[in-house]
Image (cartoon, grey):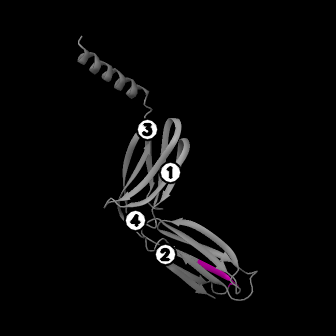
Amino acid sequence: MNSRTKFFALIIFMLGAMVANAVPLKTTVIADATAGIYKLIYRTAEAGKVKVSIYNADGDLVFTETLAHVESFTRPYNFSNLSQGEYSIVVEDKNGKTEEKVSYYFKKVQSIVEVTKIANEANKYLLSVENKDADLIDVKILDAESNILHQQSMTVNGKFSVVYNLTAIKGEITFEVVGSDGLIKTIKY
């Protein structure tokens, strides 16, 4: 073997050793499209510094963070304040870089909300919600001084009704109902 062949053999051997010792970087992204949350799961065999960056479709950086001394983690990233569109979640560590493409599109569900005082019943109210798709509904019941008497979140898919018995409450009662469309329906009695 001449010196040039020995040199290339040594280089190939060293590259093979480096590749064999590299710890694979594993990332997974799980989407909760209704909430705009993307959960990033990161795993590698040895702790180190990890940089997470999120880019929009134009390649603009919209978020970045660096985590030190981590071997694995699961972190939620909330896209609800971002514009709808395509994004890339890039994870970099000493072993390399991975990129996960995500599509953030949301659909707003419009819910029809009605609160009716039940006739001939003292302080009993019927809350009715109707929609064509699953929607997260938040209900607050307030007294005359805006103190929260009752607070509840529920997922409604189709039709839903509930009767609230507020006979122990004297004075004005206010219902505040919010759906995923962000509209607040306020009903006072």
Q: In the rendering, which numbered label is found on residue 25?
A: 3
The crowd level at tag 3 (other Cα within 10 Å; few <14, some 14-19, many 20+) is some
The crowd level at tag 4 (other Cα within 10 Å; few <14, some 14-19, many 20+) is some
Decide which of tag 3 and tag 4 comes sooner along the chain: 3
Residue picked out by circle 4:
106
Q: Secondary structure at mark 1?
A: strand
Q: In the rendering, which numbered label is found on residue 66?
A: 1
Q: Nearer the viewer, mark 3 or mark 2?
A: 3
Image quadrant holding the C terminus, namely bottom right
Relative to 134, does residue 38 appear above or below in the rendering?
above
Q: Are marks 1 and 2 in contact (CB under 8 Å)?
A: no
Q: CA separation, marks 3 and 1?
A: 16 Å
What span is colored magenta in the figure? 121-126
Amino acid at the residue labelled 2: Gly
Decide which of tag 3 and tag 1 comes sooner along the chain: 3
Q: Secondary structure at mark 3?
A: loop
Decide which of tag 4 and tag 2 comes sooner along the chain: 4
Q: In the rendering, which numbered label is found on residue 182?
A: 2
Amino acid at the residue labelled 3: Leu
Viewed as shown, does residue 136 lie left or right of 133?
right
Q: CA separation, marks 4 and 2?
A: 13 Å
Q: Whole-percent x and y of residue 78?
A: 48, 60
Q: Are marks 3 and 1 in contact (CB under 8 Å)?
A: no
